[in-house]
Every structure is written in C-alpha cells, then in structure tokens.
Image (spheres, grey):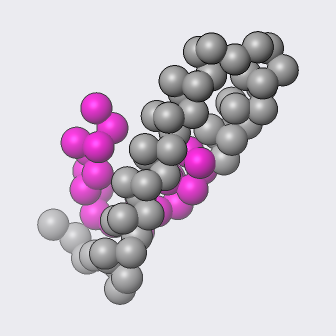
Amino acid sequence: MGELPEKFPEYSIMFRTILNQIKSLEKLKQDADDIAKNEIESKIQQYKTELEKIKKMFPEKFFESDYS
C-alpha cells in the first residue's frame, strides 16, 4: 500500500461524508421536478469533483469498497 496523506483521518472522514451526501442527493433527485433536478445534479457533480481530489491523495483503490 502506498503513502497515506498527512491528515489521513480528516480526509477519510471527509470522503465518506461527501459520499453520503451524494447518495442522499441522488435519492432526493428522484422525486424532484426538472429545475430542481438540474440544481441537484450540479451539486452532485461538485461533490464528485471533491471526491476525486481526495481520492488522488490516497493509494490506488483505497476507497474502492465505498463506491459500491
């Protein structure tokens, strides 16, 4: 396994919190109207961008089980 970032626990918690927020927004999006769906999708994409930034700080496949 590769090197963990200096602030490993904080980034790990942040990753899981953002992932949970994405899942929550995806459920909310199912019942939303078209305008709200676009706004929710925009937020989801922003969160996914943040997840990718965090994921790149960790060894490959570190969060693999979280994506299931």
User: Residue at position x 25%, y 76% from top?
Assistant: 3
Q: Which quadrant of the rendered structure holds the C terminus?
A: top left
Residue 18: percent from the left, percent from the top?
A: 49, 52
Q: How many marks?
A: 0
In this rendering, the answer to whether 51 lies above or below 30 is below
Between 44 and 55, the one lying in front of the other is: 44
**Is residue 56 something that shows in the picture?**
no
**Is residue 62 something that shows in the picture?**
yes
Q: Would you say the magenta stretch is mainly helix, strand or loop?
A: helix
User: Residue at position x 68%, y 30% from top?
Assistant: 41
Q: Quadrant of residue 32?
A: top right
User: Residue at position x 28%, y 63% from top?
Assistant: 59
Q: Is 62 on the left-hand or right-hand side of 40? A: left
Q: Is 63 on the left-hand or right-hand side of 18? A: left
Query: Range of the magenta residues?
Result: 47-68
Residue 43: percent from the left, percent from the top?
A: 68, 41
Q: Is 15 on the left-hand or right-hand side of 26? A: left
Q: Which quadrant of the rendered structure holds the N terminus?
A: bottom left
User: Residue at position x 56%, y 45% from top?
Assistant: 48
Q: Residue furthest bottom?
A: 6
Q: Residue furthest right?
A: 35
Residue 12: percent from the left, percent from the top?
A: 34, 65
Please tell me whether residue 3 belongs to the stretch shown in magenta. Answer: no
Q: Residue furthest left?
A: 1
Q: Is 68 on the left-hand or right-hand side of 54? A: left
Residue 5: percent from the left, percent from the top?
A: 35, 78
